[in-house]
Amino acid sequence: MDSVKIVRSPADANEWVVLFKEKDGKSFFLISDNDQVCSYATLDAAVHALDALGFARAEVLF
């Protein structure tokens, strides 16, 4: 994985989603166990989710 980004949800600008980008240019959203895109009401909640998964760094795009 090349980078992890927290971005505004394309479906709802009031929510945040996590985007993983690989070196070959492919991008993936963080999804739940039931294949739904994980979205977060606050930036803090998105950061907490990444921290819980063991990530130490993410870029935030407004």
Image: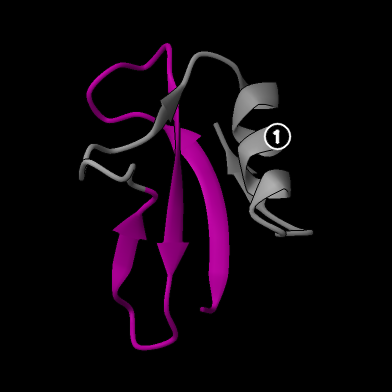
Q: Nearer the viewer, residue 32 or 5?
A: 32
- Please identify the residue farthest to the front as the structure is shown: 33
Task: Kindly indicate the quadrant of the structure image that contains residue 34.
Answer: top left
Task: Kindly indicate the quadrant of the structure image that contains residue 56.
Answer: bottom right
Provide residue 50's location: percent of width, then percent of height.
64, 47
Membership of 23 in magenta stretch: yes
**Residue at 59% across, 16% down:** 42
Task: Kindly indicate the quadrant of the structure image that contains residue 45.
Answer: top right
Q: How is the image coloured?
A: one colour
Which residue position holds label 1?
48
Which stretch is magenta?
A: 1-30
Task: Indicate left or right for 8 with 11 as reference.
Answer: right
Please tell me whether mark 1 sits on a helix, a strand or a loop. Answer: helix
- Please identify the residue farthest to the bottom as the structure is shown: 24
**Residue at 56% across, 69% down:** 3
- Please identify the residue farthest to the right as the structure is shown: 56
Residue 9, above or below 59: above
Provide residue 28's location: percent of width, then percent of height.
32, 60
Task: Indicate left or right for 24 with 3 as reference.
Answer: left
Residue 43, above or below 42: below
Residue 25, above or below 46: below
Q: Which quadrant holds the C terminus?
A: top right
Provide residue 5's location: percent of width, then percent of height.
54, 52
Task: Indicate left or right for 19 with 46 as reference.
Answer: left
- Amino acid carrying label 1: it is His
